[in-house]
Image (cartoon, grey):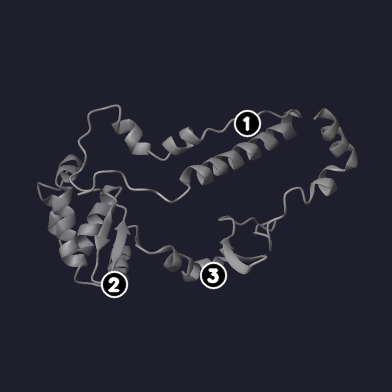
Amino acid sequence: GRNRPDYCGIYHADVLTGVYAFGAISAALYQRQLNGRGQHIDVSMLESMLTLTLNEVQNAQFEVAPPSRPMFGPVETSDGYVMVAIASEKTFQGMVRAAGHPEWTSDSRFAKYADRRRHWNDLMDGVENWSRTVTTASCLTELSAHGVPCSAYRTVAEAIDDPQIAHRGGLAEVEDDGGSFKVMNMPFRMSGAKVAAGKRAPALGEHTRSLLGENQIAGVAGKR
């Protein structure tokens, strides 16, 4: 019943473009070590976003009928939803076995990928007939046991409370004038360096003098 696209409140373009810039800067620094020359880096937010649409870019160039239901949409359980990624023949077979229907691997509607796409709605309705009878935890256990990539469909608050986040130290405590709160640390770790958010964000220009020195600051001011 919707008549307009949903609003997306996540800053995909900002974060993704920054990640690409990080990779480009790292590569440029490595090249500078080899040849002694720096270079200008141009990172496009538009192109960064389009790199997320792997299948869609291909589908936009050819006549490809969409599946009867989103292929990576949530699957309902008795107490929530799970996300499944059926991206190979092996994971398809694992999913139907987890759902208690191994015979679907030879069903004419699902045996071949093209037919499966056309009847995806029937397939996932059948899977949900099973998943609605079990809890999210049980559903994840069964899917995982059959090699199906899956995860619970969670709120952000539930996701950051995941024990794995605590185990990896994924959150850092920072401070500002209003008190303290938590932010995400970098999602990678390095064996030879500490990678973590600081206790607070530096103020604009706070470290300029210590990093550049008086002579360089004076030179920049003179150019202005």
Between discs 3 and 1, the one toward the N terminus? 1
x and y percentages locating residue 12 in the rendered image: 47, 46
Nearer the observer: mark 3 or 2; the answer is 3
x and y percentages locating residue 108 in the rendered image: 9, 46
Give the quarter of the figure containing the C terminus. top right
Mark 3 in CB contact with mark 2 (< 8 angstroms): no
Between discs 3 and 2, the one toward the N terminus? 2
Determine the secondary structure under disc 2: helix
Q: Which residue is mark 2?
A: 138
Nearer the observer: mark 3 or 1; the answer is 1
| Other-residue count near label 1 (Cα within 10 Å), few / some / many at <14 / 14–19 / ≥20 | few
User: Disc 1 residue type?
Assistant: Ile
Determine the secondary structure under disc 3: helix
Q: To which quarter of the image does residue 190 belong? A: bottom right
As drawn, 52 above or below 186: above
x and y percentages locating residue 15 in the rendered image: 52, 46
Q: Please tell me which residue is depicted at 59% across the width and 30% down the height of the picture.
A: 42
Q: Which residue is mark 1?
A: 41
| Other-residue count near label 2 (Cα within 10 Å), few / some / many at <14 / 14–19 / ≥20 | some
Q: Please tell me which residue is depicted at 82% across the width and 34% down the height of the picture.
A: 220
CA separation, marks 3 and 1? 36 Å
Between discs 1 and 2, the one toward the N terminus? 1
CA separation, marks 3 and 2? 23 Å
Q: Which residue is mark 3?
A: 166
Residue 158 appears in the rendering: yes
Residue 38 lies left or right of residue 89; in this view the side is right
Residue 157 lies left or right of residue 113; in this view the side is right
CA separation, marks 1 and 2? 48 Å
Q: To which quarter of the image does residue 218 belong? A: top right
